[in-house]
Image: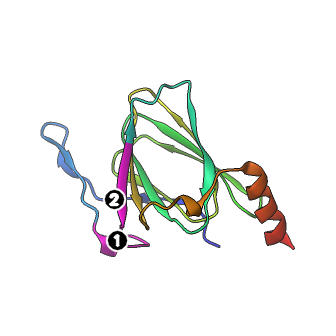
Amino acid sequence: MADPFLIEFSKIGSSMLGYISVVQNSELPFEIKRVYWTYFTPDSVVRGHHAHHDLEQIIFATSGKIVFTLEGLDNTVHEFTLDEPNVGLYIPKLFWRTIKFSHNAVLLCLASAEYTEDDYIRSYESFQQLKINHLV
């Protein structure tokens, strides 16, 4: 099973003019099928609390700061802080996540599949059962 990791994408420009980053499918571990973003999340709210059976994602903090805590089926826990818009976090399938936002954070997600509710693991108990089955 793959582990999550950071991907640094090229950044073109200068502090005087601003920057642009470009991502092409050939640079990604999957073809983009869906894009979504979240914003104005109060910093007192912790989001996430789910995993995906099959979905892979690359997530950016295009503004502000976002902290991810990811838990794998093998009990490893990874923590990543996103605060540079040209750095994305690759999240493979089957990682439970919790997400904390600064109030000005904008999360941009590139996803490997279109939305389907059946792909979500929304119960931590169900995720724990998958972990037990994985370790057997």
Q: Could you tell me how far apart the alpha carbons at marks 1 and 2 are, in whole angstroms? A: 9 Å
Label 1 SS: helix
Residue 9 lies in the magenta-colored region: no
For the N terminus, the image quarter is bottom right
Mark 2 highlights which residue? Answer: 9
- Amino acid type shown at disc 2: Phe
Check disc 1 and report the residue beneath it. 27
Q: Is residue 35 left or right of residue 78?
A: left
| Residue 89 spot, x, y in % from top left | 47, 55
Q: Residue at 14%, 36% (x, y): give it.
A: 16
Depth check: 63 or 116 in front?
116
First of labels 1, 2 by sequence position? 2
Q: Residue furthest right?
A: 136
Is the C terminus in the top left, top right, bottom left or bottom right quadrant?
Answer: bottom right
The verdict on residue 28 being magenta is yes
Percent x, y of residue 134: 79, 71
Q: Is residue 123 visible?
A: yes
Q: Is residue 85 left or right of residue 55?
A: left
Q: Which residues are magenta?
A: 24-37
Query: Hey, what amino acid is under mark 1?
Result: Glu
At horizontal 43% and vertical 67% (from top left) the residue drawn is 113
Q: Report the front residue among 130 and 67.
A: 130
